[in-house]
């Protein structure tokens, strides 16, 4: 019965500019799961009743936002199925980059009990805080002086999208994650 998914699954997100929140909302709606902003909950207490947790956050400087909180609470959540989704401008097929992002975000000893998904979202440039704009401007300068032949696909994409107002959310990309729930007996 679908009801078991709704009552046993929580979607938790940490979102600076709204992209992870949007993906979290899409996933929670599809699964009829409960949705929480990580900033508004006490992980241990709020997530205790759930058997599955879907935990999402944006990537900043190669690290998934909010995974330090997951790491801190991993023992308290030891009886739960945990799925992590990252959101960023890294293309979803760049397993090499995403592996580095995961390694930087959470130890491998914890990764082995998690499932990972990645969704693409591009920054809405004009909404960024000044400090974040400065970080991106510095990265752009570094890339502009890098010899063209040494630029990675991800770096080229960054230069193409720099300064643009495009927060594109790909709802269809969430299918494999939500499907893995409906196919699985809780
Ligand atoms: C300062 C800054 C650094 C970023 N670093 C990365 C990065 O290393 N890798 C990546 O894929 N995306 C990076 N992004 C893009 C964000 O991950 C993307 O905008 C994401 O949608 C943010 O999610 P949120 O709005 O839920 O916080 C960066 C964005 C900013 C503003």
Image (spheres, rainbow, N blue to C red):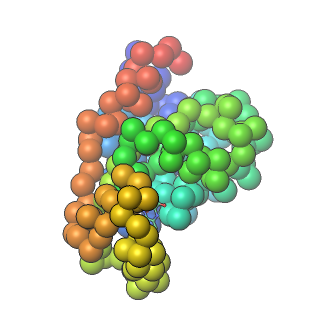
Vertical order, 111 against 5 (above or below): below
Please report the residue visible at 26 percent of the width from the left and 41 percent of the height from the top.
171
Please report the residue visible at 37 percent of the width from the left and 74 percent of the height from the top.
144
Please report the residue visible at 23 percent of the width from the left and 70 percent of the height from the top.
164
**Residue 10 seen from this side:** no
Q: Which of the 4 quarters of the picture holds residue 52?
A: top right
Q: Position of residue 167 (x, y in %)?
A: 26, 60
Please report the residue visible at 26 percent of the width from the left and 64 percent of the height from the top.
160
Vertical order, 40 against 116 (above or below): below
**Residue 177 seen from this side:** yes
Q: Which of the 4 quarters of the picture holds residue 121?
A: bottom left
Q: Nearer the viewer, residue 154 or 68?
A: 154
Q: Quadrant of ligand 1?
A: bottom left
Q: Is residue 101 left or right of residue 109?
A: left
Q: Is residue 50 left or right of residue 134?
A: right
Label tally: 0
Q: Position of residue 158 (x, y in %)?
A: 34, 63
Q: Is residue 148 left or right of residue 51?
A: left
Q: Position of residue 127 (x, y in %)?
A: 31, 76
Q: Nearer the viewer, residue 136 or 70?
A: 136
Vertical order, 87 against 78 (above or below): below
Q: Is residue 38 left or right of residue 154?
A: right
């Amino acid at each position: 019965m679908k009801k078991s998914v709704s009552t046993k699954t929580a979607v938790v997100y940490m979102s600076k500019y709204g992209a992870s929140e949007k993906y979290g909302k899409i996933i929670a709606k599809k699964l009829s799961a409960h949705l929480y902003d990580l900033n508004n909950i006490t992980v241990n207490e709020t997530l205790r009743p759930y058997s599955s947790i879907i935990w999402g956050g944006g990537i900043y400087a190669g690290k998934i936002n909010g995974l330090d909180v997951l790491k801190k609470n991993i023992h308290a959540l030891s009886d739960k199925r945990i799925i992590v989704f990252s959101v960023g401008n890294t293309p979803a097929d760049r397993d090499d980059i995403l592996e580095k992002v995961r390694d930087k975000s959470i130890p491998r000893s914890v990764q082995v009990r998690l499932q990972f998904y990645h969704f693409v979202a591009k920054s809405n440039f004009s909404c960024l805080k000044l400090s974040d704009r400065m970080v991106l401007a510095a990265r752009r300068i570094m890339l502009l002086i890098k010899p063209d032949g040494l630029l990675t696909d991800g770096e080229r994409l960054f230069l193409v999208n720099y300064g643009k107002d495009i927060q594109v959310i790909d709802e269809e990309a969430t299918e494999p994650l939500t499907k893995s729930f409906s196919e699985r007996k809780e």
